[in-house]
Image (cartoon, rainbow, N blue to C red):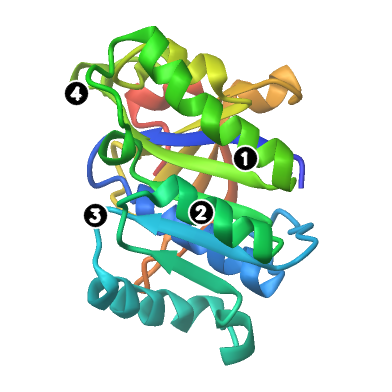
């Protein structure tokens, strides 16, 4: 509610080891169970989610799902609403087959760099051509498609920005929403969800982070705190 578009493409970007995959997996689990994510209401129509995985195999994913579910509490019936694609060969065609047969609310693509079929991430035309396929899928099947992507190493000491994602500017240009996930510089259990682009969000939501705490089960919860982006590099959270 008020964050992730129900139809369209968007992205969660961040440096390594910030918990991007965990956050997106949690979001997919919340959609499958109709549960809030970071205290934001889930308005899923079908309570169905699909995750395309390139970094974790089925064994690792099963382990992480069980761990996170200790905090989330999905029932077996809820869990059946999630689907995983580990074989990425012809994955766009396979994804469309799934979407055409099973109405789905949320698709997570983890990670963009592994799935990109162009030769150069810095080539605007190649990036836009690739992303156009998913914009068309989202519009055709009325679903939300989220990409996991990485930020450049040199951007970690800069303010959160839609321009921090690696590769062509065409990546962020195609996104309806971009969230940058950051580690807190003081408390290693805290993360900052920073909306750096949101076509239909107020400027207020794009000026301060949602401060979330990671628990022992790798699950995030909203602390209720907000930190202005200009203060993030100063270790504002305790």
How packed mark 4 is, by other alpha carbons closer than 10 Å (few <14, some 14-19, many 20 or more), is few
Q: Which residue is mark 3?
A: 55
Q: Secondary structure at mark 3?
A: loop
Q: Quadrant of the C terminus?
A: top left
Residue 178, position in %: x, y? 53, 28
Say whether marks 3 and 2 touch (CB < 8 Å): no
Disc 4 to disc 1, C-alpha distance: 32 Å
Q: Secondary structure at mark 2?
A: helix
- Tell me where residue 197 sits by quadrant: top right
Disc 1 to disc 3, C-alpha distance: 23 Å
Say whether marks 2 and 4 touch (CB < 8 Å): no
Q: Which residue is mark 1?
A: 137
- Mark with earlier residue (4, 3): 3
Q: Secondary structure at mark 4?
A: helix
Q: Which residue is mark 2?
A: 95
Q: Secondary structure at mark 1?
A: helix
Residue 153 numbered tag: 4
- Mark with earlier residue (4, 1): 1
- Tell me where residue 102 sits by quadrant: bottom right
In this rendering, the answer to whether 6 lies above or below 27 is above
Q: Which-is-in-front pick, marks 1 and 3?
A: 1
Q: Which-is-in-front pick, marks 4 and 3?
A: 3
Q: Is residue 204 left or right of residue 178?
A: right
């Amino acid at each position: 509610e008020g964050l992730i578009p129900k139809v369209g493409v968007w992205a969660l970007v961040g440096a390594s080891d910030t918990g991007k995959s965990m956050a997106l997996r949690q979001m997919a689990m919340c959609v499958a169970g109709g549960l809030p994510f970071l205290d934001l209401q889930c308005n899923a129509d079908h309570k169905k989610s699909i995750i395309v995985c390139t970094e974790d195999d089925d064994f690792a994913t099963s382990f992480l799902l069980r761990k996170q579910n200790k905090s989330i509490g999905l029932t077996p019936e809820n869990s059946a609403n999630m689907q995983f694609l580990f074989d990425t060969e012809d994955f766009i065609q396979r994804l469309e087959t799934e979407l055409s047969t099973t109405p789905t609310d949320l698709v997570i693509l983890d990670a963009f760099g592994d799935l990109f079929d162009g030769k150069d991430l810095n080539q605007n035309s190649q990036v836009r051509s690739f992303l156009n396929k998913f914009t068309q899928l989202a519009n055709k099947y009325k679903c939300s498609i989220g990409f996991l992507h990485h930020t450049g190493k040199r951007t970690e000491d800069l303010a959160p920005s839609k321009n921090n994602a690696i590769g062509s500017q065409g990546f962020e240009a195609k996104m309806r929403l971009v969230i940058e996930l950051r580690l807190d510089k003081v408390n290693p259990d805290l993360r900052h969800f920073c909306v750096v682009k949101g076509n239909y969000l107020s400027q207020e939501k794009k000026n301060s982070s949602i401060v979330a705490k990671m628990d022992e089960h790798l699950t995030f919860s909203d602390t209720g705190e907000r930190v202005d982006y200009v203060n993030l590099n100063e270790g504002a959270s305790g």
